[in-house]
Image: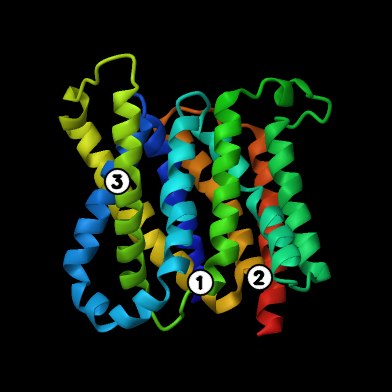
Amino acid sequence: MAYLILTLAAIFWGGNYVVGHFLVESADPIILSEARWAITAILLMSLYWHQIKVNRIKIKHSFWVILFLAIFGQVLFPLTLYIGLQYTSSLNAAIYMSATPCMVLLINKLIFKDNITRNNVIGVLLSLMGVIYLILEGKVTNIEAFQAMNGGDLWTMGSALSWAFYCSFLRLKDKTIPGNAFVAVSSSIGAVILIPVIIIYMMNASVAFNFNGYFNIRFILGLMYLVIFPSWLAYVFWNRGIQEIGATRGEVYTHIIPLSGGLLAIIFQNVQLEWFHVISALFIATGIYLCSKQARHGR
C-alpha cells in the first residue's frame, strides 16, 4: 500500500509543475502560494476540525516540529518552485526534483546517522543517471545543456533542496497525529507565514498589481487542482508512505514526478516526446524497482 500511495502523491506533484507553469503566466508566485495554502487550510480545518481538537495536546507539544516542516514543505518548496517556473520549463523543474533522493541520503547520513545500503546507492545512482541523461537530451557531450541553466533553474533546485529537508525531518513528526490533521495545521501555518511576506513584497513592488487574472475560470480551476491534489491528498499520501517505509527508501519515488510531469507536459503543453525521454524513464524505473525491492526485504 505504501508504494501505491507514494506513486499517487508523486503523480499529483507532477501535475503541480504543469498547472503551476500555466498559472504563473498570469499570477504572481507569492500570491499564488498564499492563495493555495489559505484555501487548503480553510478546507482542511473545516473537514478535520474534530481530529485537530482531539489531538490538540499532541499538536501543541509538536508545534516546533510542525513549524519547521511547514517552513520547508508549505512555504519554501512551492514558493521557490513557482518563482522558478517563471523562467524555466515545467519539465526542467520536475527533473531537478529528482535530485532529492541524493540530498535525502546525505542529510539522513550526516544528521540522523542512517545506514546507507548498497541497494540504496545503486537505486539512487541509476535514477540519477536517468535524470542527467534527460538533462543532456541523450547527448553525453551536450555540456551546453548545463551552461544554459538560468535563474529559474537555480530557484527550482532550491525547491528540490527544501523538499529534501522536509522529507528527511518528517521522521520527527508525532506519528500518532492523523495525517489530515497534520496537513491542516501545517497548511495553516504556511498560509500565516506567507502573509507578512506578501505585505512586504507588495509594499516594495515597483508596479501596481492587477488582480483581474485571478478571477477567470482557468485560474480558479488550476488553483482548485493545486488545493485538492498537490496540497491535500499528495501531502497526506506522502507523509503516510514515508512513515511506513522510511525517507531513504521512499524518497526514490520522487523520480516519478518528472515522468508524470513530463507526460502531462506532452499532453497539455505540446512537448515533443523524444527517444531520450524513454531511455531516461527506464533508468529511473529501474532505480525505483531496486529501492522498492530492498524496502520489501527489509521490512
Q: Are marks 3 and 2 in contact (CB under 8 Å)?
A: no
**Residue for badge 3:** 36
Q: Which label sits on residue 65?
A: none
Residue 265 place in picture, x, y as percent: 46, 35
Q: Nearer the viewer, residue 277 or 250?
A: 250
Local secondary structure at mark 3: helix
Q: Report the residue at 24% width, 21% height from top.
A: 209
**Residue for badge 2:** 292
Q: Is residue 277 visible?
A: yes
- Distance of label 2 from label 1 (alpha carbons): 12 Å
Question: Mark 3, mark 2: which one is toward the viewer?
Answer: 3
Residue 90 place in picture, x, y as percent: 49, 34
Question: Mark 2, mark 1: which one is toward the viewer?
Answer: 1
Q: Nearer the viewer, residue 111 or 157?
A: 111
**Residue for badge 1:** 241
Local secondary structure at mark 2: helix
Considering only order in the chain, which callout, 1 or 2, is on the residue closer to the N terminus? Answer: 1
Considering only order in the chain, which callout, 3 or 1, is on the residue closer to the N terminus? Answer: 3
Q: Are marks 1 and 3 in contact (CB under 8 Å)?
A: no
Locate the C terminus and report the quarter of the image it occupies.
Answer: bottom right
Q: Report the residue at 23% width, 32% height from top.
A: 218
Q: Callout 2: few (<14), some (14-19), or many (20+) C-alpha neighbours within 10 Å?
A: many
Q: Is residue 111 rendered to the left or right of residue 62?
A: right
Q: Callout 1: few (<14), some (14-19), or many (20+) C-alpha neighbours within 10 Å?
A: many
Identity of the amino acid at label 3? Arg
Identity of the amino acid at label 2? Ser
